[in-house]
Amino acid sequence: MDDSANEESAGTGVGPSMKVEQFLRTLGRTASDSLEVAEGMDLGRVSIVHGANADVIWCHKDGREVISTCHFATNLNLRPVAGDWVALHDNHIVKVLARRSALRRPDPNQRDVQILAANLDLVLLVVPIDRGLNVRMLERFAVMAWDSGARPLVVLTKADGAVDVPALRGETELSVPGVHILTTSSLSGEGIEQLRGLLHEGITAVMLGASGAGKTSLLNALEGSDETTRSVSRSGEGRHATTTRKLYRLSCGGVLLDIPGLRLLDLMVGQEGVAETFSDIGELATRCRFRDCGHRGDEGCAVEAAVASGELSMRRLENWRLIQSEMAHQESRRDPSAMAAQRKRWRANSKNSRKR
């Protein structure tokens, strides 16, 4: 320990362990995080991953903040991602600690799962409304958020360019029942203070949205920073402002993870997330005649009856059906025998179509 640290400890009665604990809280530590490391190791949080190493923010036992680029140990238990708590030794990440939540999507190889960010409390569903509301995208992001184990929060961006904000908020409420909604504008500052108030110490949030949704502009508005933003075309194509997953410590006390924009095809869906997002369909399903009703022409289907009466939109049911199909497809990708059976059904359907 250096002399200044000794003097401070002597003058305040605060030992190094208390300093480390205070520092970890600024990195988003909560009571739910189990952060025990072996003797002689340091504890840190991953900020950015670069191939076979990562930038880690950690605290020396004398209370000094350190940011190191650390290599992965050869026997590392997991590949770390932004937001992970890790044990460090000799400038190496030797262990990734247990994750309490994780945002995930299908790996590009279509068999495995890719973790995007870890140890989250809040998932900000960043959705622009200057050109209307993309309900299908919003619902799918909500499924992904609920499935992460964190709490979703809808952040409607670019409200300054929207024609009818109250109507768009109403449409949002119908699409994600029970989820809190904030309307924001990075230009006018609308909703920014309310969002800042939710990102206090002990909260780790991640921004989830498509390219061009205004995530980087939202970060700039929150912090008064100048992170690079780039325009994205109406079709969603263009250069992404965010090209890597990065951890930011906010002046309001919380931690925010910014990840590259996702396409619809990138989404991972899970049964729990679907149940939360489509809770209205789940409630209607309890009134179906058969417990295993598939809501596809089944006799006595209360869900389809609700569509016919106007209580439920056909668009919402169709999106639910699509997500259910994708869940089955993702599961079959991970199960070779199920995938073979699915291919057999496809071939049979194709033959029947040609006969017709």
Image (cartoon, rainbow, N blue to C red):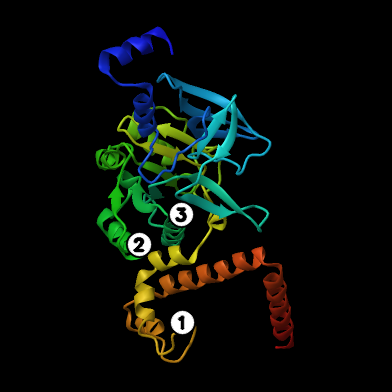
Alpha carbon distance from label 3 to label 2: 16 Å
Between discs 1 and 3, the one toward the N terminus: 3
The amino acid at mark 3 is Ser
- Residue on which the image places disc 1: 295
Residue 90 place in picture, x, y as percent: 60, 24
Q: What element carries label 2?
A: loop
Q: Could you classify mark 1 by the number of other residues whose Cα lies within 10 Å: few (under 14), some (14-19), or many (20 or more)?
A: some
Instruction: Judge from the rendering whether residue 228 lies leftward or rightward of residue 167; answer left or right.
Output: right
The amino acid at mark 2 is Val
Residue 37 place in picture, x, y as percent: 50, 35
Q: What element carries label 1?
A: loop
In the current view of this chain or complex, which residue is farthest to the front?
Answer: 39
Residue 33 place in picture, x, y as percent: 41, 43
Q: Which of marks 3 and 2 is in front?
A: 3
Q: Quarter of the image for the C terminus: give it.
A: bottom right
User: Foreground residue, 146 or 317?
Assistant: 146
Is mark 1 in CB contact (under 8 Å) with mark 3?
Answer: no
- Residue on which the image places disc 3: 148
Q: Give the residue at x 32% y 62%.
A: 171
- Residue on which the image places disc 2: 176
Q: Give the residue at x 34% y 29%.
A: 22
Is the residue 25 above or below the residue 211 in the image? above
Between discs 3 and 2, the one toward the N terminus: 3
Instruction: Judge from the rendering whether residue 115 lies leftward or rightward of residue 23; answer left or right.
Output: right
Q: Is mark 3 on a helix, strand or loop?
A: helix
Is mark 2 in CB contact (under 8 Å) with mark 1?
Answer: no
Residue 347 makes an appearance in the image = yes
In the current view of this chain or complex, which residue is farthest to the bottom?
Answer: 299
Q: Nearer the viewer, mark 1 or mark 3?
A: 3
Q: Quarter of the image for the N terminus: give it.
A: top left
